[in-house]
Image: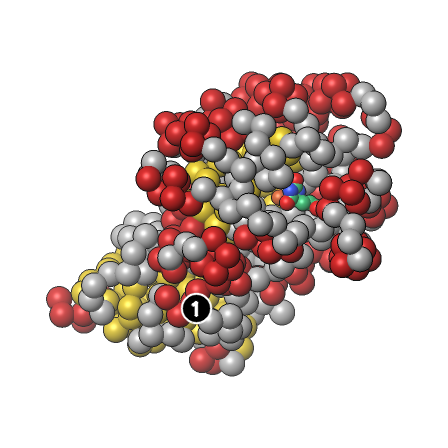
């Protein structure tokens, strides 16, 4: 079944993970006008309450649609050659210092047309939709000129517009101009930061192309003082703040982000207790990225116990990118977060639903509750923990975006082609 917007849909006898926890009883769920219109324990459900609805199915596990709050999905080329070099002993940082890494993707992205970038990103994103994704954040950061960063952001926006050949999902865009120092600014990183603050951010804000601004605060990227200038410019232009922080060393980037009221600080393997306290006090989400940890074979674990103790909301994302996390499968992150970082399956699923949405500043998706957006998945599993426990594509029975069923495996068809 592929349904139209405006139709009233009814599921019965579903187990519901509401974004934070599994509800104790079998439920009936009604969707109408793009929103969750009714949610009843089966024992209290009177069919008259949902009279006139289309029977959308029975049984299975319903979760919010998955939210991937940190990706670099738009890029030119790929870096399989560097993957091989790393197997011969080169480190991610060695490759970056030698002009490879992010900069090799910058060369390929600058050379690619907007259409070519769109056509390359679309199948990656389509595979993620078939894995339950309904909201994605996409960063720029491989252009590093005003024109090329805006080009990437336009591609990202278009990926979320079915009327322009894109796909039915929510796309949030983030300007990551401060990702790496472009070669033409070698030895002049402050001048590049000035370009980011005085030209890129204003242009992206003016054209409505970015929802947020991100920085890479790291020894191989930008200093805390430089990131601070970028955050101040983002704030002046009314854009939300995010940071890549404490991935390879501890420079205090997370605390800096918290001071600027950032939505999230991401990676965080080297985060210390002062940083955790800063996140907690500011209500900044900690986004964990086990795909990069896995790919780079990192050994330093993010401080999970401290994050729990201080009540910091933990989001989970793919970091999908051609270098440090060429992993385009949201449900794999549920498994990696548990096996590598020791999250519980419940924490992992909350990280890709309720807390992922919070890391994007989205209040109306990522939860199953009356009045929220009807972005939903129905899975052929008995309990939520199964999604993290097994790495097994093909268990998505139905995907609902904005109140419309877009994938329905029980009908053996999708309208995503
Ligand atoms: N940290 C990351 O994980 C990505 N960017 C960043 O600052 C990696 C990007 C890449 O290697 O291409
Ligand atoms: Fe990243």
Farthest left residue?
44
The residue that disc 1 covers is 389
At a point 38% along the width and 57% down the height, the residue shown is 344
- Residue 165 appears anywhere in the view: no
Q: Please, which colouring scheme is shown?
A: secondary structure
At a point 83% along the width and 26% down the height, the residue shown is 185
- Indicate the quadrant containing the C terminus: top left, top right, bottom left or bottom right: bottom right
Q: Is residue 61 above or below residue 261?
A: below
Q: In the image, residue 14 lies at what x, y percent? A: 29, 70
Q: In the image, residue 293 lies at what x, y percent? A: 59, 51
Q: What element carries label 1?
A: helix
At a point 43% along the width and 27% down the height, the residue shown is 274
- State yes or no: Cβ of the residue under disc 1 lies below 8 Å from any atom of ligand 1: no
Q: In the image, residue 121 lies at what x, y percent? A: 69, 56
At a point 29% along the width and 53% down the height, the residue shown is 369
Q: In this view, does 138 lie above or below 1?
A: above
Q: Quadrant of residue 174?
A: top right
Q: In which quarter of the image is residue 415?
A: bottom right
């Amino acid at each position: 079944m592929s349904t139209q917007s405006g139709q009233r849909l009814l599921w019965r006898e579903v187990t519901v993970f509401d974004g934070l926890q599994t509800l104790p009883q079998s439920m009936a769920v009604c969707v109408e006008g793009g929103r969750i219109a009714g949610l009843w324990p089966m024992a209290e459900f009177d069919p008259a309450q949902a009279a006139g609805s289309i029977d959308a199915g029975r049984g299975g596990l319903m979760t919010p649609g998955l939210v991937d709050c940190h990706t670099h999905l738009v890029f030119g080329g790929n870096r399989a050659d560097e993957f091989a070099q790393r197997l011969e002993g080169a480190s991610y940082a060695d490759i970056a210092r030698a002009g490879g890494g992010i900069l090799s993707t910058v060369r390929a992205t600058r050379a690619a047309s907007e259409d070519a970038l769109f056509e390359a990103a679309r199948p990656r994103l389509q595979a993620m939709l078939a894995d339950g994704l309904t909201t994605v954040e996409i960063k720029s950061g491989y252009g590093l000129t005003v024109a090329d960063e805006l080009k990437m952001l336009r591609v990202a926006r278009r990926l979320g517009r079915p009327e322009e050949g894109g796909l039915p999902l929510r796309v949030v865009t983030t300007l990551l101009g401060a990702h790496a120092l472009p070669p033409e600014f070698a030895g002049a990183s402050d001048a590049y930061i000035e370009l980011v603050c005085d030209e890129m951010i204003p242009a992206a804000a003016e054209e409505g192309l970015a929802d947020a601004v991100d920085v890479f605060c790291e020894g191989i990227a930008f200093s805390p003082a430089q990131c601070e200038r970028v955050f101040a410019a983002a704030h002046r232009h009314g854009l939300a703040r995010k940071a890549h922080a404490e991935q390879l060393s501890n420079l205090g980037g997370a605390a800096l982000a918290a001071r600027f009221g950032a939505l999230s600080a991401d990676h965080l393997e080297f985060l210390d207790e002062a940083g955790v306290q800063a996140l907690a006090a500011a209500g900044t989400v900690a986004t964990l990225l086990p795909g990069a940890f896995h790919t780079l074979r990192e050994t330093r674990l993010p401080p999970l116990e401290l994050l729990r103790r201080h009540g910091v909301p933990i989001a989970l994302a793919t970091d999908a990118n051609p270098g440090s996390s060429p992993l385009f499968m949201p449900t794999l992150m549920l498994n990696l977060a548990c096996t590598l970082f020791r999250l519980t399956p419940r924490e992992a699923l909350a990280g890709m639903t309720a807390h992922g949405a919070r890391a994007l500043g989205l209040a109306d998706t990522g939860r199953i509750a009356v009045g929220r957006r009807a972005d939903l998945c129905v899975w052929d599993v008995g309990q939520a923990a199964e999604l993290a426990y097994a790495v097994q594509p093909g268990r998505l029975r139905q995907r609902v975006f904005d109140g419309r069923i877009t994938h329905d495996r029980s009908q053996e068809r999708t309208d995503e082609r």
